[in-house]
Image (cartoon, grey):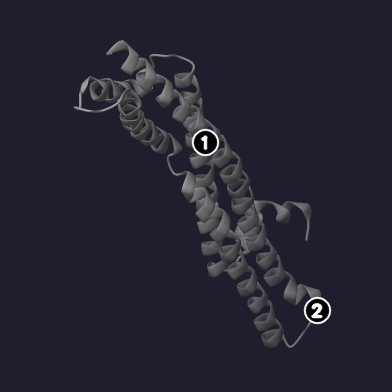
Amino acid sequence: MDALSLSPLALFLQAGLVGKIVMVVLGLASIWCWLLIVEALFGLARLSRALRFTNSPLLEASDMEGHEEAKIRIAGETVSERRARVTEKLTRGHIEVLMNAEGGLANLAVISSVAPFIGLFGTVWGIMASFVGIAAARDTSLAVVAPGIAEALAATAYGLAAAIPASIAYNRLGAAFSRIGQRMTHRAADRAAQFCRDLA
């Protein structure tokens, strides 16, 4: 097998119908994975920028809801109970913003867990094709089994190419969003205290 035939395109063209379908599915999964990663990175950047400022356009709607909640007076309610109520309202709004920023982050977990199995299916199919080739040719030479084995290994490589970035990104981005979530929770508490003081 020459160096040219080791390119992803050449391996795709040399594969059988089932192998090509598996590689196309994994190629689309890989593209989708990178789109989700870029979307999540943009979401993280927007949230980080929003948390640097007291009045952020991204969190404005949530702040307005919290401010309106702080205006409500309930008979017999203590200051701490009022602050807790406003904090809860702000936190709900902040969580909604956080979930929108996360986008399809959970889909990265799906890609990272499913892609290796799709690749494994292509691997098994390629090995089966090799055995069929052996039976048809009544020959066990490398020339007979090589195409099927190459297809099998290519499917494995395509599966790993989709799964590895998805798995790394899901873990790293998930941790980053968790840290941002903590900061947003603290912000909600601070803003609630401020609203309650301003409207005392």
Mark 2 Cα-neighbour bin, 10 Å: few <14, some 14–19, many ≥20 = few
Query: CB atoms at circles 2 and 1 under 8 Å apart?
Result: no
Can residue 38 be seen here? The reply is no
Mark 2: secondary structure: loop
Residues 183 and 177: in front is 183
Can you identify the residue that label 1 sits on? Answer: 177
Residues 45 and 184: in front is 184
Q: Position of residue 191 (x, y in %)?
A: 39, 20
Q: Nearer the viewer, mark 2 or mark 1?
A: 1
In which quadrant is the N terminus drawn? Answer: bottom right
Question: Which residue is rendered at x = 45% and y = 28% of the image?
Answer: 184
Please, is residue 79 above or below residue 29 in the view? above
Q: As shown in the figure, which amino acid type bears the numbered disc 2?
A: Ser
C-alpha separation, residue under disc 2 versus residue under disc 1: 54 Å
Q: Position of residue 140 (x, y in %)?
A: 78, 82
Q: As shown in the figure, which amino acid type bears the numbered disc 1?
A: Phe
Q: Is residue 140 left or right of residue 33?
A: right
Residues 67 and 115: in front is 67
List the single residue furthest toward the top: 198
Please, is residue 176 above or below residue 25 in the view? above
Q: Is residue 93 left or right of residue 175?
A: left
Question: Which residue is rendered at x = 61% and y = 61% of the image?
Answer: 116
The image quadrant that residue 147 belongs to is bottom right
Question: Which residue is rendered at x = 32% and y = 29% of the image?
Answer: 81
Mark 1 Cα-neighbour bin, 10 Å: few <14, some 14–19, many ≥20 = many
Can you identify the residue that label 2 sits on? Answer: 141
